[in-house]
Image: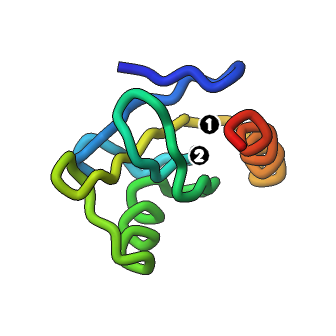
Amino acid sequence: MSIQIGRFSFRGPFTNLDEIKDRPGIFIVHKGEQKIDPYFICETPLLKSSIEKELKANKLELGSQKNCFISVYNTFCVLTLDRKEMVEEIETLLL
C-alpha cells in the first residue's frame, strides 16, 4: 500500500520494522492507517535503525493496538541536504 503526500509516495503504513530496510530515506511516525496524523517526520541515511531509535526515545510502539504506524519514502541517490528540503516540503503539506 502507499500513501500519497503531494509528489511523494510513501510505502506503508507499517506496523512491523522487519519490513523496512536500512536505506536512505524519509520516515513519518503517525497515528491512523488512512489519514496521516504525524507525530514527527525525519530524514536519515539508515531508515530502520533511525526508526528504532526514535520509537525508543519517544516511548512509542508500533501497531493497531498502540495506534502508531510508520510510512517510508526511499531516497537512494539523494544528499542529506536534499532530504532535509523534502522533509520541509512534506511538513508544509501535512501541517
Looking at the picture, tell me which residue is in the foreground, 8 or 93. 93
The residue under label 1 is: 75
From what the image shows, is residue 22 above or below residue 92? below
> Which quadrant does the C terminus fall into?
top right
Which residue is located at x 48 percent, y 24 percent? 3
- At x 50%, y 37%, the residue is 36
Q: Amino acid at mark 1?
A: Thr
Of the two numbered discs 2 and 1 on the same chain, state the one appearing first in sequence.
Answer: 2
Q: Position of residue 9 (x, y in %)?
A: 56, 22
Quadrant for residue 1, please give it.
top left
Looking at the picture, does residue 45 appear above or below residue 61? above
Quarter where residue 73 is shown: top right
Percent coordinates x, y for residue 2 in the rendering? 43, 21
Given contact means CB atoms under 8 Å apart, are the residues at marks 2 and 1 in contact?
yes
Label 2: few (<14), some (14–19) or many (≥20) C-alpha neighbours in 10 Å: many
Q: Is residue 9 above or below residue 71?
A: above
Q: Secondary structure at mark 2?
A: strand
Residue under the point 56% across and 20% down = 4
Report the residue marked by disc 2. Answer: 26
Residue 39 in picture, x, y percent from top left: 52, 57
Q: Is residue 50 left or right of residue 95?
A: left
Q: CA distance from mark 2 to mark 1?
A: 7 Å
Q: Amino acid at mark 2?
A: Ile
Q: Which mark is residue 20?
A: none
Q: Position of residue 38 (x, y in %)?
A: 54, 49
Q: Is residue 66 left or right of residue 30?
A: left
Q: Going by the image, does 53 lie left or right of 44?
A: left
